[in-house]
Amino acid sequence: MKITKLTTYRLAPRWMFLKIDTDAGISGWGEPVIEGKARSVEAAVHEFEPYLVGQDPARINDLWQVMYRGGFYRGGAILMSAIAGIDQALWDIKGKVLGAPVYELLGGLVRDRMKVYSWVGGDRPADVIRDIQRLREGGFDTFKMNGTEELGIVDSARKVDEAVARIAEIREAFGHDIEFGIDFHGRVAAPMAKPLLRALEPYRPLFVEEPVLAEQDEQYARLAEHTSIPLAAGERMYSRFEFKRVFAAGGLSIVQPDLSHAGGITECLKIASMAEAYDVALAPHCPLGPIALAACLQVDFVSHNAVLQEQSMGIHYNQGAELLDYIVNKDDFRIEDGYMRPLPKPGLGVVVDEDKVMAASQRAPDWRNPLWRHADGSVAEW
């Protein structure tokens, strides 16, 4: 069997699907994208095409190394996201050829169901209690929300008090009937992270995500020494070679690689195993589409240290399409009591509605994240 063609489809709300065809009539699907840089990743996918067409899709490990090591310059958000989507599609083909879900090819299940959580609110936290109440009706009891709006490198006590007051109100409204993580989103610089973490401790969040930017990862261990809140990060880290330094330095309790950004299933399995060796939990990042989620679940169901799975049903970014709009087997993705079951179909377990994908790709928007500025006019972290 040989790879014959790679086709990309940019789609609302901010996704991109990849189809890899073979001369045996078996196709695989992946989701290579960087939110806001879909066209850049699309170009990178097609730059890899000469290395793939005519090759045996079963040789996933070799093709991964060709894509990673075959170019002198490597790594980073764009290239690793392109490799990630291609890798997902190759695993999808392999599972379909062998008639088994990918998790079976990786050794079989370590759990019967996977805990999932839901985003609440938008970029500027508001109406959070109302949204939690709505989502609880859909079976969720675990959530994540943004912790702050714009925050300067050194900012006021008022800003800290406002951020903490929102969390206090949520805990008062729901007690411990729900659990929630708080995403600092890289908006908090090291000088403000320590006082903000300390002020949040009485409200016992499940974790604080990206307490500082990934490029300030040397701060993780320092911050962990000053808080009892588990720290989580990893969505803006793209290979085991970045994660290894963080694991060695310590500080993270939860690692969050993205299966569409960090080299796909092949690479994230290695990251998950490295995390387990350091007694770090796994909670893959996934505010994306159904193929990305399916890939995450394959890793979750074979990784003993997987504890939580992000998913994008109903999140505020989903303007123009929802998670299940482009797939046929919607019922396989149902959430029961806050959990998902293993996807039963071969490969990634996603049956893509290709006609709908092709039609929607004709009018795909170019999503961009907002550009924020501080009161003095300087650019703020979004």
Image (cartoon, rainbow, N blue to C red):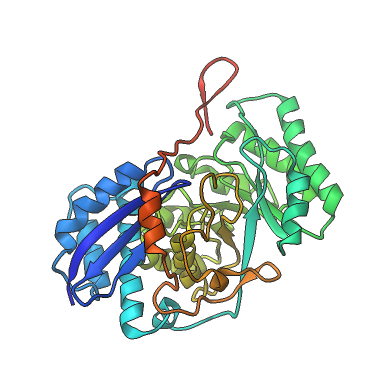
Reply above or below: 313 against 307. Answer: above
Q: Is residue 238 visible?
A: no
Q: Is residue 374 visible?
A: yes
In terms of image quadrants, where is residue 53?
bottom left
What is the number of callouts on the image? 0
Instruction: Give coordinates of residue 102: x percent, y percent.
Output: 41, 77
Q: Identify which residue, 120 or 14, lies in the foreground.
A: 14
Instruction: Give coordinates of residue 381: x percent, y percent.
Output: 52, 32
Q: Identify which residue, 314 or 356, lies in the foreground.
A: 356
Q: Identify which residue, 320 or 73, lies in the foreground.
A: 320
> Where is the N terminus found, in terms of image quarters?
bottom left
Residue at 33%, 84% in the rendered image: 98
Reply above or below: 66 against 102. Answer: above
Residue 105 vs residue 233: left or right?
left
Residue at 60%, 26% in the rendered image: 152
Instruction: Give coordinates of residue 219: x percent, y percent.
Output: 54, 42
Reply above or below: 163 against 315. Answer: above
Reply above or below: 38 against 49. Answer: above
Instruction: Give coordinates of residue 77: x percent, y percent.
Output: 36, 47
Residue at 45%, 46% in the rendered image: 14
Q: Identify which residue, 315 or 48, lies in the foreground.
A: 315
